[in-house]
Image (tube, rainbow, N blue to C red):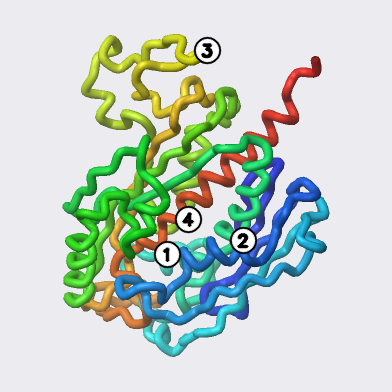
């Protein structure tokens, strides 16, 4: 199973949703980077279950334990291991799902590939696996801040089903996003989104939506031509997040409605730097960052496990029905915001280190 991400800043996540613990091993982190459990915990708290009335009620403190690679608050340059213990497990809620495949979940495909699966909580297919990614990104951010001070990565909920937020990626702030439990960058629409999620949950159903992300103050030159283009790496990173079904950067699919004359970003000199007058490229041209804001969107499908009765089959090939049990998000987007930020951070730190390694010797 491919559980490793990155080339120079490499992470390897481990653990199942209802196993003893989940976590991450990080290799390639430079030495003498200031790291504390508080820095990691701050990001994990944004992702953890039970944090508000619209997310899964599973009560997990998600307490980070640094097992290696850090001494006296500084990274050693050796592999860093971070573990989070699972403390609120209820495997009995998945007894029926051990034999019946949840529609649109990974139950059947894991069986088809491996001939065995961790039925409780979905095992590695559970979003609980992303704890390791968020923890690793908290460390990556500290490295990125030293390489490129001022770089900023912010994600927010753009839409919940048909409800659309109005957010300016150039001016939105972390405070605006974190001011509401749905984590939209438009606080005026937050209550409508929250009410919709509650109504859907009360019907035993789920909804999806779109998360937007902006990377501000990114220097030009990050990204590798051809197969490791920056937008290709971002797309892979985002589509590796559970429940994702779409990715677009800059003008995205709407750019197909424009002509080249309308779509092209003209260059100009501004404050002594080469800039573009528009940003339909989304901050990336030829697979390499151009110094403008990198802006992209990620589509999340409705949560697969719902309380309503659905038709399915058993592992023995028998037609049956299934009513989901357990504690699940009716909408994953509020908790997915820090995960999108984390994966963007992991892509950037890898390309930042690659750029530093390949810089010409003067």
Q: Which mark is residue 339?
A: 4
Q: Earlier in the sequence, mark 4 or mark 3?
A: 3
Mark 2 or 4 closer to N-term? 2
SS under mark 3: loop
The crowd level at tag 1 (other Cα within 10 Å; few <14, some 14-19, many 20+) is some
Q: Identify the residue at image location x=45%, y=81%.
A: 59
Tell whether label 3 touches label 1 (CB within 8 Å).
no
Query: Closer to the N terminus: mark 4 or mark 1?
Result: 1
Residue 156, horizontal then vertical, whole percent? 36, 50
Q: CA distance from mark 2 to mark 4?
A: 16 Å
Outermost residue on the front side: it is 271
Q: Position of residue 269 (x, y in %)?
A: 46, 10
Camera sees residue 177: yes
Q: With respect to residue 5, does 357 lie above or below?
A: above
Circle 1 or circle 3, nearest the eye = 3
Front tag of 4 and 3: 3
Q: Secondary structure at mark 4?
A: helix
Q: Which residue is the site of mark 2?
A: 39
- Give the mark toward the camera: 4 or 1: 4
Q: Picture quarter containing residue 319? A: bottom left
Quadrant into which the N terminus falls: bottom right
Q: Which mark is residue 106?
A: 1
Give the x, y percent position of residue 249: 38, 34
In what element is the residue under mark 2?
helix
Mark closer to the chain start, 3 or 2: 2
Left or right, 228 with reference to 334: right
């Amino acid at each position: 199973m491919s559980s490793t991400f990155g080339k120079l800043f490499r992470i390897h996540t481990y653990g199942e949703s209802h196993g003893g613990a989940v976590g991450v091993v990080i290799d390639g982190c430079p030495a003498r980077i200031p790291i504390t459990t508080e820095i990691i915990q701050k990001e994990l708290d944004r992702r953890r279950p039970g944090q508000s009335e619209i997310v899964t009620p599973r009560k997990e403190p998600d307490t980070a334990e640094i097992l290696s690679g850090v001494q006296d608050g500084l990274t050693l340059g050796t592999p860093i291991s971070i573990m989070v213990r699972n403390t609120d497990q209820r495997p009995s809620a998945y007894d029926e799902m051990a034999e019946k495949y949840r529609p649109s979940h990974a139950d059947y495909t894991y069986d088809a590939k491996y001939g065995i699966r961790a039925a409780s909580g979905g095992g590695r297919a559970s979003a609980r696996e992303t704890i390791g990614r968020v923890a690793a990104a908290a460390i990556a951010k500290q490295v990125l801040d030293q390489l490129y001070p001022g770089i900023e990565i912010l994600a927010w909920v753009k839409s919940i089903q048909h409800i659309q937020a109005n957010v300016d990626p150039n001016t939105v702030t972390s405070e605006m996003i974190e001011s509401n439990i749905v984590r939209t960058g438009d606080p005026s629409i937050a209550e409508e989104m929250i009410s919709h999620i509650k109504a859907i949950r009360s019907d035993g159903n789920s909804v999806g939506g779109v998360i937007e992300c902006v990377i501000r103050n990114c220097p030009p030159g990050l990204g590798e031509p051809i197969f490791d283009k920056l937008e290709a790496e971002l797309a892979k990173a985002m589509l590796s997040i559970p429940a994702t079904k779409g990715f677009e950067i800059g003008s995205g699919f709407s750019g197909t409605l424009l002509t080249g004359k309308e779509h092209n970003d003209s260059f100009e000199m501004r404050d002594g730097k080469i800039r573009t007058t528009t940003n339909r490229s989304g901050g990336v041209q030829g697979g390499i960052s151009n110094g403008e804001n990198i802006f992209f969107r990620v589509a999340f499908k409705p949560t697969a496990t719902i309380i309503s009765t659905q038709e399915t089959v058993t592992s023995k090939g028998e037609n049956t029905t299934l009513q989901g049990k357990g504690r699940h998000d009716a909408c994953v987007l509020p908790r997915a915001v820090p995960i999108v930020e984390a994966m963007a951070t992991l892509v950037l730190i890898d390309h930042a280190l690659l750029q530093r390694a390949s810089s010409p010797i003067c």
